[in-house]
Image (cartoon, grey):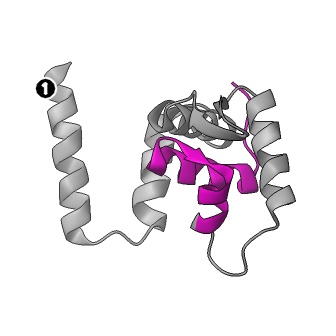
Amino acid sequence: MSKLSKSEEELMNMLWKRKKAFMKDLVDSYPEPKPATTTVATLLKRMTDKGFINYINIGRSREYYPLVKKKDYFSKEVNGLIKNFFNGSASQFASFFTQETDLSKAELEELKKLIDQEIKRK
């Protein structure tokens, strides 16, 4: 699986949220100022070529849908981040994440609970 550019990720998030959409729906999803239709068409073409989305023809329109699940893409991105920036150490990543993201005590407690549950599962 290749990587999406920031613009492609933004558009992909819209498509993941909608499950399927026509180009007009996607353009309408953008905040003002909306990108040109040709810009969105180019992004959709690139994302199709990369294998992230596909479409079905309905009349003269294309209805786009994701081929990659958001969870799968995000998991690959996070694992790449850990590998490239934290020497493959999830604990270094967790240390950085908990210290540098200004989490509240309640959020840290929730993370601890999630970790404890995962430990019990293993």
Q: Which residues are magenta?
A: 1-28
Q: Can you give x and y, in whole percent of width and height, for residue 76 in the image? A: 57, 31
Give the secondary structure at mark 1: helix
Viewer-side residue, 56 vs 111: 56
Query: What is the quadrant of residue 66 in the picture?
Result: top right
Q: Residue 12 colored magenta?
A: yes
Name, please, the residue furthest toward the front.
Answer: 59
Viewer-side residue, 1 vs 63: 63
Residue drawn at (56%, 34%), measured in percent from left and top? Answer: 73
Pointer 1 residue = 120
Q: Is residue 84 above or below residue 41?
A: above
Viewport quadrant of the C terminus: top left
Viewer-side residue, 25 vs 113: 25
Query: What is the quadrant of residue 31 in the picture?
Result: bottom right
Query: What is the quadrant of residue 56 in the picture?
Result: top right
Viewport quadrant of the N terminus: top right
Q: Is residue 121 above or below residue 53?
A: above
Viewer-side residue, 16 vs 85: 16
Residue drawn at (43%, 63%), measured in percent from left and top? Answer: 99
Residue drawn at (15%, 35%), measured in percent from left and top? Answer: 117
Which SS does the magenta portion mostly show?
A: helix
Q: Can you give x and y, in whole percent of width and height, for residue 17 in the image? A: 46, 50
Q: Is residue 121 above or below residue 91?
A: above
Q: Is residue 50 above or below residue 4?
A: above
Q: Can you give x and y, in whole percent of width and height, for residue 54 in the image? A: 66, 29
Mark 1 surroundings: few (<14), some (14-19) or many (≥20) residues within 10 A: few
Q: Residue 22 colored magenta?
A: yes
